[in-house]
Amino acid sequence: MTRILLLLLLVAATAAGQVATFSIVAYDPVNGDWGVTVASRYFSVGSVVPWAEAGVGAVATQANVNVGYGPRALELLRQGRAAKEALDQLLAEDKFEGKDGRQVAIVDGQGRIATYTGPNAPSWAGDRQGKTWSAQGNILVGPQVVESMGRAFEETQGELAERLFAALKAGDAAGGDARGKQSASMLVVRKQGGRNINNDRYIYINVDDNPQPFPELRRLLDMNLGYLYQDKTFKLLRSGKTQDARDAAARAAHYFPDRSDAHLSLGMINYAVGDKKAALTAFRSAQRLDKNFRKQFDAAAARPANKAILEDKAFLKELFPE
């Protein structure tokens, strides 16, 4: 009977606007990234919790959520307020009911952190901080969720998006939202880092309604990063930075292991920098993935930048022994 009552109370809390969730906000001073990732037993959590602006900061607003905390916090940070000053003003200005049940975390443009978990945020509720990150959550199985997130973030190498995902996955593995799973989101901003022109949204992916949101979030993250590294490859090639383009193409192939074109591009660049062994490995990966590989290879090799490969009879014989 007690368990049934608890479940009813949790459902009622959600209906009343509680965004039970676990999230992490963080800053990467090396690449100039600010980001938020979040998961919850709540429909479309990405439409409510994560907010970020390149050069300004990132915000997670949850629990008895006041969605206005997101844009207002960024506005205050843009005006030059530190994270703590912005948080204090948010709380002072909040005239809506239920302020003592809110939860918010802010990282500002200099990586400073400020957090608030209200005394009436649905338990377990709390937060933990590191030098450039804050993990927080409510209606969790316990403090081990945010503690595991912090450890994973600190121990993971690579860019901010990968560290955020590792933290979120660790929080889920530690028990996550006590009610279960439904949605997840990630937002990472970087000045002019997004796809196309004049776009600061480096990563913006959402899983709105899925009983297993983490594999889907991982799939979308791989796609997002794969396209970003492909775009970076082409821009570096146009700038004549072939070695850097090779590194970017290798990252694209890593995120697109099943796409023949990613391995084909990597093979061509490997050949251009004189690494025939790596070129052969990449081409063979592309060959396994595409029954029409020879046609795609010939089309790519016919481009002026790649024509030398057509004159390398020994290499072609090794690649196409028939």
Image (cartoon, helix red, strand yellow):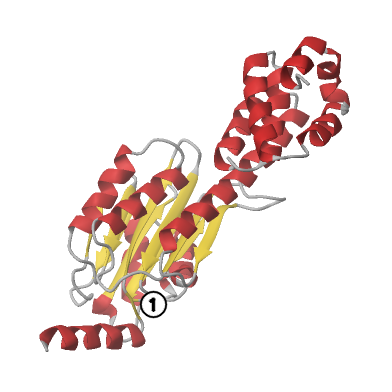
**Residue furthest out toward the front:** 322
Q: Is residue 11 above or below residue 235?
A: below
> Position of 239 compared to 73: left or right?
right
Q: Looking at the picture, how far across and down is residue 76, in whole percent?
A: 45, 63
Q: Quadrant of the N terminus?
A: bottom left
Give me the residue at 25% from left, 82% from top: 10
Q: Looking at the picture, how far across and down is residue 255, in whole percent?
A: 56, 42
Give me the residue at 36% from left, 69% from top: 181
Give me the residue at 24% from left, 70% from top: 178
What type is the residue that disc 1 sits on?
Asn
Front residue (pair 181, 12) = 181
User: Are there few (<14), some (14-19), or many (20+) residues within 10 Å of tag 1?
Assistant: many
Quarter of the image for residue 145 reads: bottom left
Q: Looking at the picture, how far across and down is residue 25, in whole percent?
A: 38, 55
Q: Looking at the picture, how far across and down is residue 254, in whole percent?
A: 55, 37
Front residue (pair 5, 77) = 5
Front residue (pair 88, 108) = 108
**Residue furthest out toward the left:** 2
Q: Is residue 307 above or below residue 43?
A: above
Is residue 243 visible in the rendered image? The answer is no
Is residue 113 visible in the rendered image? The answer is yes
Mark 1 — residue? 66
Quarter of the image for residue 296 reads: top right
Q: Is residue 206 above or below residue 112?
A: below
Quarter of the image for residue 176 reads: bottom left
- Secondary structure at badge 1 equals loop
Give me the residue at 39% from left, 62% from top: 38
Q: Quadrant of the C terminus?
A: top right
